[in-house]
Amino acid sequence: MALVGFTRASIQQVESQISSIDTSTLNGKLFVGYQAWFRRPSEDDGNSHWTTDLPTPEVGHVGVDMIPNVTSYPPECLFDTPFTLPDGGPAQFYTNDCEGVVDLHFKMMADHGISGAFMQRFYGYIHEANGGWVNILNYAKTAAEKYGRGFVIEYDLNGAATSSTNVTETFLADLAALSSITSSSAYMHHNGKPVLEIWGFGIVTEVTVDDGIAIVTALKEAGWYVVLGVQQAWHAELAANQPGSFGPVYQLADMIQPWTVGAYDLNNYDDFHDGRQAVEDANALRDLGIESSIVVWPGGSSSNANPNEAFDHFPRWNGTFYQKQLDGAVSLKPNFIFGAMFDEVNEGTAIYPLLRNRELPTNQRFLGIDDDMEPDTYLSMAGDAASRLAASWQ
């Protein structure tokens, strides 16, 4: 299928933003979610995220469906795998706990006009002494300052449980420990406050509503602007107002970001956009006086990590699916667009440079981007949408 609304000429790299972005506001920007969780086998905490059930990725034991194009990566940050490329050489994977990788990724964002990254900080990893996570936050801080990008810490509630931990105290203590990072000139602010996202209310069921209220209240009292990443039918849950529902948590948010990955495909996206996003979500947010972020994603596949799932279960359709969402999001003029994700090859939502179908290993099934695409096509598409959204806010 041809790429709709995005000519081959316009797929050429979007002109870089020469000057630094304005880190005092989220308005008119496109940020990407940055997992940054990949490691060498046995490095740091031992979870490489390249595999699911073995210390090292092996044929039949790999946790990603797509493979990054590592042509420009620092060689010291790469390692060989047993996956055989068409030329007979080994496919190489990378570690994020290598400053050159994080630097390169932020350079890619800058080169394509993407505003920066929301750095994923998983609750279950906060207390790990050897996880490399603080190293990576420091690498991101340095790279964002270097390339004039912005960044935000995004806490993921996976691993949190009201029954076994005080989530509020954990977040506040962690933020105090990370003050040298969040004080960066590249750290995003909005409405005069530093920005923080909490992802997972209504999705991670181990955290209760009461705990959610306590978390958001405490963070706002501590001076943070709080974005909540919530389940995609959040407003219906709020309206139903059933005992145990997260409506009271949603109402406390400064900004709502419904998590729409997997909520639609190419065939029913228009209905979702025209009904759910343009009417239901927009009206609910307006009535509540809450600001808006819209999630876009290029497609999805996670069959290597989840063998019961169909391969390429959310096809990209040569970029058409992503382009429709980018156009739809820009038309609604949210405060900012969230690109899910920059580097999520595990679930096949990555937009950084990827191997094409003809470049894939021959001894393990992987999903590639189309052979007629440049490796950075999805970055260019995101950068074009970022430019159009910025213009709508001027």
Image (tube, rainbow, N blue to C red):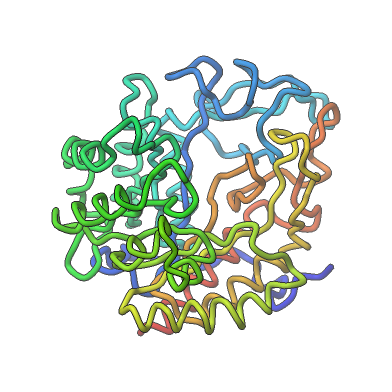
Identify whether 209 is placed above or below 9: above
Q: Residue at x 71, y 39 (%)?
A: 65
Residue 338 is situated, as x and y percent measured from the top left of the image, at 47, 62
Nearer to the camera, 165 or 59: 165
Q: Quadrant of the C terminus?
A: bottom left
**Residue 255 in view here:** yes
Instruction: Decide if residue 135 is in sight here.
Output: no
Seen in the picture, residue 348 relative to 90 is either above or below; the reply is below
Q: Please tell me which residue lies in front, 58 or 270.
A: 270
Quarter of the image where one finds residue 44: top left
Left or right of 277 in this view: 60: right
Q: Is residue 127 left or right of residue 370?
A: left
Q: Position of residue 343 (x, y in %)?
A: 55, 45
Q: Residue 189 versus residue 82: which sits nearer the camera?
A: 189
- The percent position of residue 50, horizontal first and vertical second, equals 61, 28
Image location of residue 24, percent across then percent down: 23, 66
Residue at 78 percent across and 49 percent down: it is: 312
Q: Which residue is more in the foreground, 95 or 194?
A: 194
At horizontal 68% and vertical 78% (from top left) the residue drawn is: 270
